[in-house]
């Protein structure tokens, strides 16, 4: 079994406080299987996500975690459904680190977007913005967006085209498509949100019970199924929480070899796309509404400290850009960094003032309709914060001063 402090010493590895802030998740308050799954993923991440490496046999994992067999097996099912690991039996078997595919990640995104009612036009909007960015760090978000868009378009097409038939030939894709059709039907049916039994659903959606069982597991992974007892009870479909997709994409990002620093650059790209879309929406507002939004956002920022202030600014811009996919990818990237232990650097007063000046400049430029000036201030703020994070995470402590002063 791997020898890791993330596994030894109890069930849960306490997440960094900043992770709890950006994700809203408290892993130490989750179920025991979710906590074990959390630690398994963290252990694989700490090792550099070496696909093919055996984490340990069931007996070794039971001793290492100090939990019951049912808890461990439930945790293993969680990481297997995410494509993070797989359990093989036999003398030389064990829980093996796997590499989730882009298709798995795109499927998870498509299901989440469908559950939130995100139209494919919003997906195409983000794809268009990312394609205009001649930057390598736009590649990963673009691939995820294109994959999710392909899934959503295949679901809407229903035309029996060769492309659709090829996608449906994969049982995992077929289960994901059935899950999205269940979501669609639950919003338009006679009893919205209420699902029948597995047998009834199999007949209704013209699929086998095996595929239907997989589809229901997909929905359960997103915490979208709720059992209500008593008269009028049954199994109901509910809205997924944002943390559901964060968990789904963590192992994919980790398996791609991303670190705090490399994922930070991708988040900067998404933040820039967020600013561009928000700027376009803001320019279409009546002047009085635009000024009220600027004033309200500026007041909120003045009451906060970094890094919360920057997070709130991005959230305010996201409310304007109104692109669920963009907001989801940015959230997943920010949570990935925080879970990896994103260093929150010490910030001397002069740097705090510089950051606040950049943030004020962003709002002022947006108020005047000067998107180029807003992007310049945005880039300056991100460059300064990126330098602070790298300095805080350096092995040899550096004097934290502005890059312009170095």
Image (tube, rainbow, N blue to C red):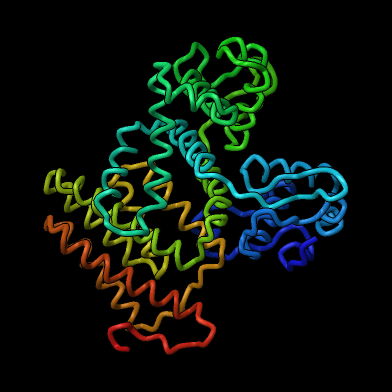
Q: Is residue 359 left or right of residue 155?
A: left
Q: Is residue 330 left or right of residue 35?
A: left
How many dots with numbers? Answer: 0
Q: Nearer the viewer, residue 356 or 296?
A: 356
Q: Residue at x 27, y 57 (%)?
A: 134
Q: Residue at x 50, y 56 (%)?
A: 335
Q: Quadrant of residue 9?
A: bottom right
Q: Nearer the viewer, residue 246 or 260?
A: 260
Q: Is residue 265 left or right of residue 253?
A: left
Q: Is residue 38 above or below residue 351?
A: above
Would you say residue 406 is visible in this rendering? yes
Q: Residue at x 80, y 60 (%)?
A: 1
Q: Is residue 337 above or below residue 90?
A: below
Q: Residue at x 64, y 59 (%)?
A: 50
| Quarter that holds the C terminus | bottom left
Q: Nearer the viewer, residue 124 or 377?
A: 124
Q: Percent x, y for residue 157? A: 38, 21
Q: Percent x, y for residue 358? A: 25, 70
Q: Quadrant of residue 71?
A: top right
Q: Percent x, y for residue 6? A: 71, 64
Would you say residue 29 is visible in this rendering? no
């Amino acid at each position: 079994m791997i020898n890791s402090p993330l596994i030894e010493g109890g069930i849960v590895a306490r997440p960094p406080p900043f992770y709890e802030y950006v994700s809203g998740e408290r892993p130490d308050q989750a179920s025991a299987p979710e906590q074990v799954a959390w630690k398994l993923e963290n252990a694989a991440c700490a090792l550099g996500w070496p696909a093919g490496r055996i984490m340990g046999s069931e007996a070794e994992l039971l001793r290492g975690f100090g939990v019951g067999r049912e808890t461990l097996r439930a945790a293993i099912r969680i990481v297997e459904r995410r494509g993070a690991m797989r359990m093989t039996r036999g003398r030389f078997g064990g829980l093996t680190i796997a590499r989730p595919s882009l298709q798995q990640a795109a499927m998870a995104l498509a299901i989440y977007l469908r559950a939130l009612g995100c139209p494919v036009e919003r997906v195409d909007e983000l794809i268009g913005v990312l394609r205009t960015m001649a930057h390598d760090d736009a590649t990963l978000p673009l691939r995820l967006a294109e994959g999710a868009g392909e899934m959503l378009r295949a679901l809407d097409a229903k035309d029996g085209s060769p492309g659709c038939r090829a996608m449906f030939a994969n049982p995992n894709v077929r289960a994901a498509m059935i899950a999205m059709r269940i979501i669609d039907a639950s919003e338009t049916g006679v009893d919205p949100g209420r699902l029948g039994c597995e047998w009834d659903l199999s007949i209704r959606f013209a699929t086998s019970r095996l595929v239907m069982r997989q589809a229901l597991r997909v929905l359960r992974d997103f915490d979208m199924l709720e059992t209500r007892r008593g008269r009028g009870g049954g199994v109901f479909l509910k809205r997924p929480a944002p943390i559901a997709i964060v968990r789904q994409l963590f192992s994919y990002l980790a398996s791609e070899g991303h670190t705090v620093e490399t994922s930070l650059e991708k988040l900067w790209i998404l933040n820039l796309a967020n600013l561009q879309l928000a700027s376009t929406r803001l320019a279409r507002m009546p002047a009085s509404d635009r000024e009220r939004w600027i004033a309200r956002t500026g007041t909120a920022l003045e009451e906060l400290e970094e890094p919360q202030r920057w997070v709130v600014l991005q959230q305010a811009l996201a409310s304007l850009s109104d692109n669920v996919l963009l907001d989801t990818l940015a959230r997943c990237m920010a949570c990935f960094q925080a879970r990896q232990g994103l260093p929150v650097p010490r910030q001397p007063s002069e740097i705090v003032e510089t950051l606040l000046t950049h943030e004020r400049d962003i709002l002022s430029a947006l108020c005047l309709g000067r998107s180029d000036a807003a992007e310049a201030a945005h880039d300056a703020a991100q460059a300064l914060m990126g330098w602070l994070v790298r300095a805080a995470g350096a092995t040899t402590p550096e004097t934290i001063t502005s890059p312009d002063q170095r």
